[in-house]
C-alpha cells in the first residue's frame, strides 16, 4: 500500500518539490478563488438585470471570447518577451477591471452591456496571462514533470471551484455582487507579489527576437504543419463546443431544473469542482496506464452521460452526482490536451502553441456557450443539454482519424543551438537575402520510392521551421541526381530556421541522408540572391565567390565524417 502511494505521489505531486512552482501554485489558488467568486456574482447579477437565457450565456462568452481573439498575440509576446513581466501586466489589468466593476456596481450604475464589458476586460487580462503562465511551467519544473505540473494547476483551479462558487453564492445572496467583485480584486495582490519576487532568468538568445507579426505567423505555420498539434487542436475544439453546454447553462440548471437560487448555483459549481479535483488527482496516474487517446475517449463518454443526466434530473442530489462525473471528465480531457501541446512543442514556440490551443479551446467554449444558449432559448433547456450530451458520445470514434498523441519521449531541444553556422565568405548582414539552399543527393534507382516517402516528411519539417519555396528537382541527364531547394527571406531568418530543427527531427533527416549514394554526405550549397544590377558594385573576387559552396565539418549522422569534397551540413 505504501508502495502504491509512493507511485501515485511520484506521478502526481513531484512538482511541489520545486519551491517556485509551489509559490506560484498557492498564489494562483488564492486568485482563482477570487475569480470564481466574481464569476458567480456576474452570472447571478445578469440573471437579476437581464434574465433571458441568451444574455446569461453571454457572460461566459464575454470571458472566453478574448482568449480566442488575443491568445495568439499573447503567445507571441510570451515567446519573445519576458514572461514574468507579461504575467505581472495581465494581473494588474485584471485587478483594475475588477475593482472598477465593484465600484460601478456599488453605486448602482451597472447595466447588462456594461457588465459584459467589464467581464470582457477580465477575459482580456486572462488571455494575456494564460500563455505566459502555462508556457512558463517548463521554466518552473523539469520537462518530465510538465504533465504532472499541468494536472496540479488544474487541481488548484478545481480546489477553488469546490468552495469558491458556494462561497460566492453566499456572498451574493447576503452582501450583493459588488462584494464578490471586490474580493476578486484583492485576490490578485498575492500573485502579483509572488511574480514580483520571482528570480526568473529568461533563456539566453543567440539571435535577436522576432517581431510580433513574424512571431505570430511562425507560430501559426508551426502549428499548421505539425500533425500532432492539429489533431490535439481539433479534438479540443470539438470537446469544448459540446461540453460548454453545462458550463454556460449552469445558472439555469440551478434555477429552472433544480428550482434553487444563488446558493444552489454555487453548490452545483462546487460539485463540479469536487469532481474536477478527483480528475486532477487521477489524470497523471491514469496517464501511466492509459494512452492520451483512451483518456479523452473516457472523458467524452462520462461528460456526455453527465450532460444528459443533468437535463433529466430535477433533484439536487442527482444533479450534483452527475456533475461530479462531469467535473472529473472536464479536467481529464483538458489537462491531457494541454500537456500534449506542451510536450510536443519545442521551447522556442511553446508560448504560441499553447496560445493557439487556448484560442481554439476557449473559442469553442465561447461559440458553444452562445450556441447552447440560443438552443435553450429557442427550444428548451433540456433539449439543449441532451443534444450536447449525445454529440459528446458521438465524438468517441474521432480517435480513429485524429488521435491525441503520445509524445513524452520526444527530444525537442535544438540539435544545432551550440553549433553556429559558419560565416559566409562574402560580405553579408542579417537582413541580406534571400538566402537560397541547394542540397544535392545521389539516389540509386531502387531507393527512389523510399527517398520520395522520406522527402515528404522532410519537406514538412523544413516548411514548418520557416523554409520558403521548397522544391525537389530531378536531373533529366543524370537520373541519380536530385536537388532539394528552398530559401529564407534573409540571412537572419536562415539562421533562425536552422536552429529550430530539433533532435527529434534528426531521425527524419537521417532517413533521407542515409539513402544518399554510398552513405556519403549530400552536397549543400548556399547562395545569396542578387539582382543583376548589384553585380557592378562587386569587385572581381566577390563575383567569383558568389554562390560558392561553403564547407562545414559537423557530421550529419553520428559516427560519420565529412568527405573532403566540400559537402556541408545545412
Image (cartoon, rainbow, N blue to C red):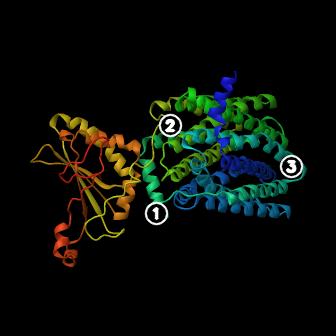
Tag 3's secondary structure?
A: helix
Few, some or many residues within 10 Å of mark 1 (<14, 14–19, 20+): some
Tell me which residue sits at (54%, 43%) in the image: 143
- Quarter of the figure with the N terminus: top right
Most foreground residue, 320 or 275: 275
Q: Residues within 10 Å of mark 3 (few under 14, many from 20)?
A: many
**Residue corresponding to mark 2:** 408
Q: How far apart are marks 1 and 2 (CA)?
A: 28 Å
Residue on which disc 1 sits: 210
Rate crowding at label 2 as few (under 14), some (14 to 19) or many (20 or more) other CA atoms within 10 Å: some
Q: Which of 113 and 97 is in front in this view?
A: 97
Disc 1 secondary structure class: loop
Spatial CA distance of label 3 from label 1 is 47 Å
Observer-side mark, 3 or 1, equals: 1
Nearer to us: label 3 or label 2: 2
Residue at numbered disc 3:
171
Which is more N-terminal, label 1 or label 3?
Answer: 3
Position of residue 36 relative to residue 326, above or below, is below
* In this view, 71 is above or below 544: above
Q: Which of these two is toward me, 274 or 202?
A: 202
Residue 288 screen position, x and y as percent = 57, 29
Return the residue nearer the eye: 501 or 445: 501
Mark nearer the N terminus (1 vs 2): 1
Closer to viewer: mark 1 or mark 2: 2
Q: Mark 3 and mark 1 in contact? Answer it, CB < 8 Å.
A: no
C-alpha span from label 3 to label 2: 44 Å
Amino acid at each position: 500500500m505504501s508502495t502504491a502511494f509512493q507511485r501515485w505521489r511520484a506521478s502526481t505531486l513531484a512538482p511541489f518539490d520545486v519551491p517556485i512552482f509551489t509559490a506560484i501554485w498557492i498564489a494562483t489558488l488564492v486568485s482563482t478563488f477570487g475569480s470564481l467568486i466574481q464569476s458567480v456574482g456576474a452570472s447571478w447579477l445578469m440573471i437579476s438585470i437581464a434574465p433571458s437565457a441568451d444574455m446569461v450565456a453571454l457572460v461566459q462568452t464575454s470571458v472566453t471570447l478574448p482568449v480566442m481573439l488575443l491568445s495568439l498575440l499573447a503567445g507571441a509576446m510570451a515567446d519573445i518577451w519576458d514572461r514574468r513581466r507579461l504575467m505581472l501586466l495581465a494581473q494588474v489589468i485584471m485587478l483594475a477591471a475588477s475593482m472598477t466593476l465593484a465600484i460601478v456596481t456599488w453605486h448602482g450604475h451597472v447595466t447588462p452591456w456594461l457588465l459584459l464589458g467589464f467581464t470582457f476586460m477580465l477575459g482580456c487580462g486572462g488571455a494575456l496571462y494564460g500563455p505566459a503562465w502555462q508556457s512558463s511551467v517548463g521554466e518552473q519544473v523539469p520537462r518530465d514533470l510538465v504533465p504532472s505540473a499541468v494536472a496540479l494547476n488544474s487541481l488548484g483551479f478545481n480546489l477553488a471551484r469546490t468552495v469558491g462558487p458556494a462561497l460566492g453564492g453566499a456572498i451574493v445572496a447576503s452582501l450583493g455582487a459588488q462584494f464578490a467583485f471586490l474580493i476578486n480584486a484583492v485576490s490578485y495582490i498575492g500573485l502579483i507579489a509572488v511574480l514580483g519576487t520571482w528570480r526568473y532568468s529568461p533563456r539566453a538568445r543567440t539571435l535577436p527576437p522576432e517581431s510580433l507579426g513574424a512571431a505570430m505567423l511562425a507560430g501559426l505555420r508551426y502549428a499548421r504543419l505539425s500533425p500532432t498539434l492539429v489533431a490535439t487542436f481539433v479534438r479540443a475544439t470539438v470537446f469544448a463546443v459540446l461540453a460548454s453546454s453545462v458550463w454556460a447553462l449552469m445558472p439555469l440548471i440551478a434555477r429552472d431544473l433544480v428550482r434553487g437560487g444563488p446558493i444552489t448555483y454555487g453548490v452545483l459549481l462546487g460539485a463540479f469542482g469536487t469532481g474536477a479535483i478527483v480528475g486532477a488527482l487521477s489524470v497523471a496516474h491514469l496517464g501511466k496506464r492509459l494512452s492520451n487517446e483512451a483518456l479523452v475517449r473516457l472523458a467524452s463518454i462520462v461528460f456526455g452521460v453527465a450532460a444528459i443526466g443533468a437535463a433529466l434530473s430535477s433533484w439536487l442530489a442527482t444533479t450534483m452526482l452527475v456533475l461530479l462525473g462531469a467535473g472529473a471528465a472536464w479536467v481529464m480531457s483538458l489537462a491531457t490536451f494541454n500537456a500534449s501541446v506542451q510536450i510536443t512543442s519545442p521551447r522556442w514556440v511553446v508560448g504560441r502553441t499553447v496560445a493557439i490551443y487556448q484560442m481554439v479551446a476557449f473559442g469553442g467554449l465561447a461559440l458553444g456557450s452562445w450556441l447552447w444558449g440560443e438552443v435553450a432559448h429557442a427550444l428548451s433547456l433540456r433539449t439543449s443539454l441532451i443534444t450536447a450530451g449525445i454529440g459528446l458520445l458521438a465524438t468517441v470514434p474521432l480517435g480513429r482519424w485524429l488521435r491525441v498523441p503520445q509524445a513524452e519521449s520526444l527530444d525537442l531541444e535544438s540539435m544545432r543551438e551550440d553549433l553556429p553556422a559558419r560565416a559566409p565568405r562574402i560580405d553579408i548582414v542579417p537582413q541580406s537575402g534571400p538566402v537560397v539552399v541547394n542540397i544535392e543527393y545521389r539516389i540509386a534507382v531502387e531507393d527512389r520510392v523510399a527517398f520520395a516517402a522520406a522527402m515528404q516528411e522532410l519537406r514538412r519539417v523544413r516548411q514548418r521551421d520557416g523554409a520558403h519555396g521548397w522544391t525537389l528537382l530531378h536531373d533529366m541527364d543524370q537520373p541519380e541526381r536530385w536537388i532539394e531547394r528552398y530559401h529564407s527571406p534573409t540571412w537572419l531568418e536562415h539562421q533562425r530556421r536552422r536552429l529550430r530543427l530539433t533532435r527529434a527531427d534528426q531521425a527524419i533527416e537521417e532517413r533521407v541522408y542515409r539513402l544518399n549514394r554510398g552513405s556519403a554526405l549530400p552536397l549543400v550549397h548556399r547562395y545569396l540572391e542578387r539582382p543583376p544590377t548589384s553585380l557592378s558594385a562587386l569587385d572581381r573576387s566577390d563575383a567569383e565567390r558568389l554562390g560558392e559552396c561553403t564547407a562545414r565539418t559537423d557530421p550529419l549522422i553520428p559516427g560519420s565524417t565529412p568527405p573532403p569534397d566540400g559537402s556541408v551540413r545545412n
